[in-house]
Image (cartoon, rainbow, N blue to C red):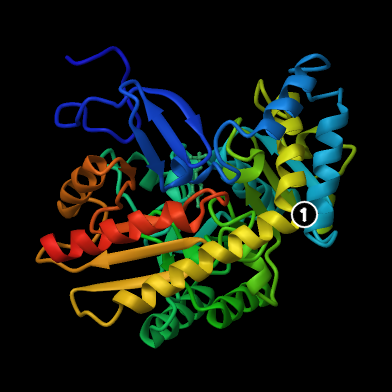
Amino acid sequence: MKETIWRPYTQEKTAANPIKIKKAKGCYYIDEEGNRIFDGISSWWVNIHGHSHPYLAKKLSEQMELVQQIIFAGHTHEQGETLAQRIVELLDNQYPKVFFSDNGSTAVEVGLKMALQYWSNHHLKKNRIVAFKNGYHGDTFGARAVTDAIKEPTGLSENMTDVHFITAPLANDPISQESSIKELKDLLSRFNDIGAFIFEPMVQGVAGMKMQDPSTLNKLLKLAHEHQVITIADEVMTGFYRTGKRFAIDYLKEKPNIICLAKALTGGILPLSLTLCQQKIYEAFYSDDKTKALLHGHSFTGNALGCAVANASLDLLETAETKTNIKNIENLHKNFMKEIEGDNKYEIRVMGTILAIEFKNQEKAGYFNSLSETLSQFFISKNMLLRPLGNIIYLIPPYCTTEEDLLPVYQALKDFIRIHI
Ligand SMILES: Cc1ncc(COP(=O)(O)O)c(C=O)c1O
């Protein structure tokens, strides 16, 4: 046994010893030996402004002197109210009700409950759910039940609800686009108890940064709405300019009924998440009957420190400087893509600040592809934290990342291809 801590997503028997980080600043970790490690994945896609940002630290410390954590039922605080109001406005006032929880998985749980209870509060049993093949929505049981990307060996979550997985409409792939429409139409004609359709808009993260065709996604949403299905956009990874636009649903004309936000919400400093819904969803819960309420809440719901740092993160996010940084990263990714594309041994794709390279080998593509170990070791040896998803390596850096930070990473990617592919 190596240590006391049981780590997330880790096969403890074969994993290397964890690297001890002493400090983190900007887009770098500093380990105990003084190595600077480039954080190419924004610390699991959460950190958007860089580590130890002085403005976020200041706002957090100011809040420490006021309110840290209070019960959010029957009580409220300034930071929570301000945050809810700001997010509602950023979404053009189309989602006027905001429910707080702690992480992406719980934001999804809440979204699913809102959708299914919407129907039961209307005295209808519509518990069937549609989701995308290869989609990922979190690790709690409900979120796992609608996840297809990483199959859990327990099989427990598969029995929780009736979930149907349809093909996702991938960009530049007309076959998948046609299949997705056909499969959804088929389900809608077979079942009249489909209550919800949950999806990662524009990019399926854990699937390997698989990018989608917005016009087909639009059609899918339209079809779902025509058949009285509640749509849930899981923006946990895509929100806050990851895809180039503020939210991935900004690529769509047809808007979902419910939106889940987490990860970058607090700038990646504290765990906090939001589930927003349209007025009609909220109204189904608004009643003299207590049992019609959304009976969900966590001890730390609406944590005031999390809300304060989320407000501070929004201050930074909406500055011209951050927007320019985001555009620069996208341009750098696109230039790199042009430089190396055109090889049949891999596919490269870019959207916003996300760049992914999918390598083809003899094995089944996906999370358990053994190229993952070769990729990990190669980049760790270069002090670059790029955590592959099986045969796919990707970059999703903090927005403060500059050309100077990215050039050595692009060079390392070229070296990997030259040596190993
Ligand atoms: C699209 C999506 N939804 C939900 C989650 C779960 O979020 P969390 O890890 O904060 O529970 C993730 C995490 O990667 C995600 O990518």
Q: Quadrant of residue 326?
A: bottom right
- Which quadrant holds the N terminus? top left
Q: Which of the two residues, 264 or 102, is positioned nearer the viewer here?
A: 264
Position of residue 150 in the picture relative to residue 67 (left or right):
left
The amino acid at mark 1 is Ile
Residue 30 visible? The answer is yes
Left or right placement of residue 366 versus residue 130 in this view = left
Q: Residue 20 placed where, x, y %?
A: 34, 22
Look at the picture and state if 142 lies above or below 319: above
Residue wearing tag 1: 281
Q: What residue is shown at x 18% (from left), y 69% (from top)?
A: 360
Using a 10 Å C-alpha cutoff, classify the residue at mark 1 as few (fewer than 14 neighbours), some (14 to 19) or many (20 or more).
Answer: many
Q: Left of 400 or right of it: where is 372?
A: left
Q: Residue furthest left?
A: 362
Find residue 333 and report its image quarter: bottom left
Quarter of the figure that contains the C terminus: bottom left
Residue 229 in sight = no
Q: Position of residue 406 (x, y in %)?
A: 42, 56
